[in-house]
Image (tube, rainbow, N blue to C red):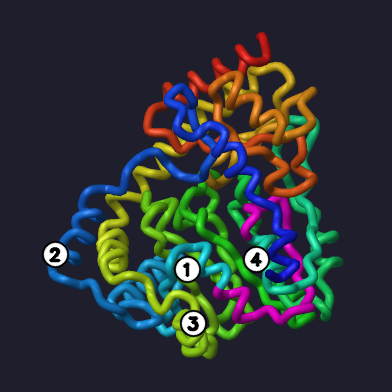
């Protein structure tokens, strides 16, 4: 086996979850998904597809009707996005790996902004790239203590003509940090000068609470680029459509890439399954019945959890501008993995360790607040306080 694969770290999130899975007494907030099931009309679309016998291969790039539906959906958010720029993938993770396979050669330099979901930094390493990480910075005082911010000058200085790819995730998992429009424009202009590709993970764009954009979505690189720019955007049905287990996502790319991406999909997964794509079509057709409700509920979850955490002595946390996580530091508990494991075994509270996302997030914990029942969040804070003997 390749040494790069042997050297891969196991997921610390899974390590914590494995310690608590199967225990009915654990309140689990470790994974990035809601505990609400997919809406019934989306599930029914998949059932209807299976009952029609749609159990065969689809086009590598996805069903034409789903590609058109995605293009229409994206166009309502970001101006004209042509279906010829869309490829349907077997989940957002698959979309990310496909994009990296398409753009990275072994030995290429890749810059990633961290902390970030560990898949985004593991995938370039798997492909033999040289990874450089630029950290966000936590604010330790003032009204925004616990929030993370970007040192734009440091990021731009790290991107040189030798940088093949820049990887960004905003709204960010785990910190909730979100790029501003001005920051995006500066990054795009700089990457045009250096010839660097941008891979933007924007799967949380609809889970946005700042309210400072016209369409209610987080700022997107699609708003400040042309179709021919060196930009690939990754999306997923998982978060804003409550479809994590369906494994359905999509890519937006320059038109010249799309045909070649179809070839790459063939050699990875061949295609996304037809019945999941039928569910995706219905999800997009009826997005007004799903996503606004999801976002409103998640905002209520955030606004329930964060003040309770802020009232706990030793906790630093800020309200996330986007995403579905409260990311907080816990004074006196410097080893995130040890703390997370102790919380599972001693308090029945399942959180993700911050150092799963980057070394600079050591001492932090991620709490997924996507809970149907707000009382579960309150109970979780009570367990944390009891464990801290407060």
Q: Work out how far the residue at label 3 is from the one at label 4, CA to CA, in angstroms.
A: 17 Å
Rounded to the nearest angstrom, the CA distance separating label 2 from label 1 is 36 Å
Residue 301 pos. (x, y %): 47, 32
Q: Which residue is mark 3?
A: 267
Q: Residues within 10 Å of mark 1 (few under 14, many from 20)?
A: some
From what the image shows, is residue 213 above or below residue 102?
above
Provide the residue designation for mark 1. Answer: 78
State which tag comes first along the sequence, 2 or 1.
2
User: Which mark is on residue 51?
Assistant: 2
| Label 2 secondary element | helix
Q: Report crowding for label 3: few under 14, some 14 to 19, many 20 or more residues within 10 A (C-alpha).
A: few
Task: Examine the rendered structure and indicate whether residue 193 appears above or below residue 3.
Answer: below
x, y (%) of residue 171? 59, 52
Q: Which residues are magenta?
A: 98-119
Which of the marked residues, 3 or 2, is nearer the chain's N terminus? 2
- Identify which residue is drawn at 45% across, 63% down: 91
Q: Residues within 10 Å of mark 2 (few under 14, many from 20)?
A: few
Q: Which secondary structure, mark 4? A: helix
Q: Which residue is mark 4?
A: 123
Earlier sequence position, callout 3 versus callout 1: 1
Residue 14 sits in which quadrant? top right
- For the point 67% across and 9% down, the residue is 389
User: Closer to the N terminus: mark 3 or mark 4?
Assistant: 4
């Amino acid at each position: 086996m390749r040494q790069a694969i042997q050297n891969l770290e196991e997921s610390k999130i899974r390590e914590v979850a494995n310690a608590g899975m199967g225990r009915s007494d654990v309140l689990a907030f470790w994974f990035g998904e809601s505990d609400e099931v997919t809406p019934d009309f989306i599930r029914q679309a998949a059932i209807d597809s299976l009952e029609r016998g749609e159990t065969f291969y689809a086009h590598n790039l996805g069903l034409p009707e789903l590609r058109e539906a995605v293009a229409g959906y994206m166009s309502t958010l970001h101006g004209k996005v042509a279906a010829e720029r869309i490829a349907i993938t077997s989940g957002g993770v698959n979309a990310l790996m496909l994009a990296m396979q398409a753009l990275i050669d072994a030995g290429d330099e890749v810059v990633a902004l961290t902390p970030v979901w560990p898949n985004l930094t593991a995938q370039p390493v798997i492909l033999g790239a040289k990874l450089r990480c630029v950290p966000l910075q936590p604010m330790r005082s003032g009204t925004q203590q616990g929030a993370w911010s970007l040192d734009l000058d440091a990021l731009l200085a790290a991107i040189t003509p030798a940088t093949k790819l820049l990887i960004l995730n905003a709204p960010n998992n785990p910190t909730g940090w979100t790029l501003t429009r001005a920051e995006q424009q500066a990054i795009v202009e700089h990457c045009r000068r250096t010839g660097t590709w941008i891979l933007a993970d924007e799967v949380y764009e609809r889970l946005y609470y700042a309210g400072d954009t016209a369409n209610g979505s987080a700022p997107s690189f699609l708003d400040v680029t042309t179709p021919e720019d060196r930009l690939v955007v990754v999306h997923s049905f998982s978060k804003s459509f409550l479809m994590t287990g369906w494994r359905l996502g999509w890519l937006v790319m320059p038109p010249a890439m799309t045909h070649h991406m179809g070839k790459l999909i063939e050699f990875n997964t061949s295609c996304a399954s037809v019945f999941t794509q039928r569910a995706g079509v219905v999800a997009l057709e009826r997005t007004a019945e799903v996503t606004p409700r999801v976002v409103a509920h998640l905002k209520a979850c955030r606004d329930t959890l964060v003040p309770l955490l802020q009232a706990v002595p030793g906790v630093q946390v800020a309200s996330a501008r986007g995403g579905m996580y409260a990311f907080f530091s816990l004074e006196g508990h410097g080893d995130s993995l040890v703390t997370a494991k102790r919380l599972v075994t001693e308090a029945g509270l399942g959180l993700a360790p911050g150092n799963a996302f980057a070394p600079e997030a050591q001492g932090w914990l991620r709490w997924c607040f996507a809970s149907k029942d707000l009382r579960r969040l309150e109970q979780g804070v009570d367990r944390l306080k009891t464990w801290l003997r407060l």
